Image (tube, rainbow, N blue to C red):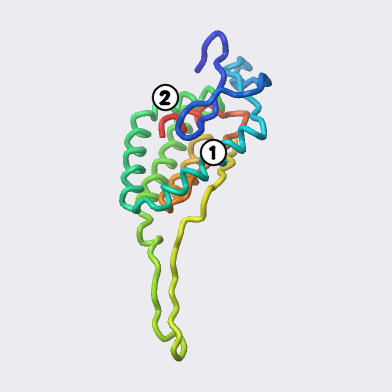
Amino acid sequence: MRSAEHETVRNIVGGRPVEPERPDRIDVTNPATGAVLARLPLSTAAEVAAAVESAREAFSEWSRTPVPERLRVLFRFREKLKEHVPELAELIVTDNGKTLAEARGSIQRGLEAVEFATSVVPYLMGSIQEDVASGIDCELHRQPLGVVAAITPFNFPVMVPLWMAPVALACGNTVILKPAEKAPLAAARLAEIF
C-alpha cells in the first residue's frame, strides 16, 4: 500500500477491486508524520449506485442461503482475519496513529464480534404462540432486510466494521462498507481479506 507513487485505494464491488472513474483524490496521511500513505478516490454518485445495485443483486441469493452455510463463510473469514492480524495492526498504527497494543486490542474486539455473529442462530429463530386470544395464534418470522450500509468512524477502522458487517451477513443481509476517509487503509484491506 505504501509505494513511492502513493497507490490509489480502490473500491471493492462484488468482491472485486474497481478502478475509480474520476481523477479526484484526497491524500491519506500518517497522523504521526504527515507522510502521504495513499490516495483515496472521491467516488461518484454512479459508483455508489453501482455498489448498491451489486449488493442488491447479491442479496437475492445470499438471503436464501441457508443459515449454516452463511455461518461457514463467517468461520472461514474469522480464520483469514486471524492470519492477517499483524498486517491489519500495522495498518491501523500507520493510518490511524494508535499504538500497536491498541491496534491489536481493537482487532481482538472485532474478532470477538465475528465469533458472536457465528452464534446468531437462536436469534434468527421465529416462534409460534397458539391461542394468544380466543382463536388467535401469533407467529413471528425473522427475515433478512436487504442492503445494509455501514458508515464507520476513523477511530476504530477495523473493530467497528467487524461489529456491523458480520452480524448483518449472518442474518442474510448484504453490506456496503464506507470507511472514514481519514483512515481507510485498514478497512479497505479488511474488505479485501473477506
90, above or below 104, in the image: above
- In the picture of the structure, the residue carrying the numbered disc 1 is 177
Most distant residue in the bottom direction = 134
Quarter of the figure with the C terminus = top left
Residue at horizontal 44 percent and vertical 36 percent from the top: 107
Query: In the displayed structure, would residue 43 be above or below residue 110?
Result: above
Residue 82: image location, x then y, percent? 35, 33
Q: Nearer the viewer, mark 1 or mark 2?
A: 1
Disc marking residue 41: none
Q: Are marks 1 and 2 in contact (CB under 8 Å)?
A: no
Q: Amino acid at mark 1?
A: Leu
Secondary element under disc 2, as helix, strand or loop, is: helix
Q: Which residue is mark 2?
A: 87
Q: Amino acid at mark 2?
A: Glu
Q: Residues within 10 Å of mark 2 (few under 14, many from 20)?
A: few
* In-image side of 140 versus 180 (left or right): left
Closer to the camera, 192 or 100? 192
Residue 87, percent across and down? 42, 24
Image quadrant of residue 86?
A: top left
Nearer-N-terminus badge (1/2): 2
List the single residue furthest toward the top.
4
Q: Nearer the viewer, residue 158 or 8?
A: 8
